[in-house]
Image: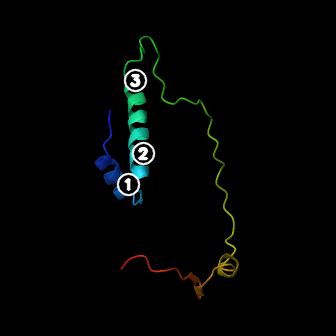
Amino acid sequence: MKISRDEVRKIAHLARLEIDDSQTDKMAEQLSDILGYIDKLKDVDVEGVELSSDAAFMNNVLREDEVKPSPGPDVTLANAPERDDDYFIVPRVVK
């Protein structure tokens, strides 16, 4: 599958990336190569291969939850650049 320069620009815009023309050409080529490889996977013979719910047979690696006392706002906010009583002050992100 061939990815056009316009499609790369649209993807970059959606991903909030700034890319110049040389990067656009290179990205179009790389994405086309990736999609071409994925197309090859359609032709793989999987006859007789048993379905698997996950590729890596892992046991649950999460730890059990433990209830611990909170260290409190003084410890939690000790390294905060700015604070207001028991709250972090952060830059406004919504206009």
Query: Toward the viewer: 94 or 31?
Result: 31
Residue at horizontal 43 percent and vertical 76 percent from the top: 93
Q: CA distance from mark 2 to mark 1?
A: 10 Å
Dot 1 falls on a residue whose secondary structure is helix
Residue at horizontal 32 percent and vertical 47 percent from the top: 5
Check the image and report above or below for 3 versus 53: below
- Residue indicated by mark 2: 27
The reply to whether dot 2 and dot 1 touch (C-beta < 8 Å) is yes
Check the image and report above or below for 38 versus 7: above
Which amino acid type is shown beneath numbered disc 3?
Lys
Q: Which of the two labelled residues, at mark 2 and mark 1, occupies the earlier sequence position?
A: 1
Image x and y of residue 7, in percent: 30, 47
Query: Toward the viewer: 28 or 57?
Result: 28
Which amino acid type is shown beneath numbered disc 2?
Met
Q: CA distance from mark 1 to mark 3?
A: 26 Å
- Residue indicated by mark 1: 12
Q: Quadrant of residue 16?
A: bottom left
Crowd band around label 3 with a 10 angstrom C-alpha radius: few (<14), some (14–19), many (20+)? few
Dot 2 falls on a residue whose secondary structure is helix
Label ID, residue 40: 3
The reply to whether dot 2 and dot 3 touch (C-beta < 8 Å) is no
Crowd band around label 1 with a 10 angstrom C-alpha radius: few (<14), some (14–19), many (20+)? some
Dot 3 falls on a residue whose secondary structure is helix
Image x and y of residue 43, in percent: 38, 18
Quadrant location of the N terminus in the rendered image: top left
Query: Toward the viewer: 25 or 31?
Result: 25
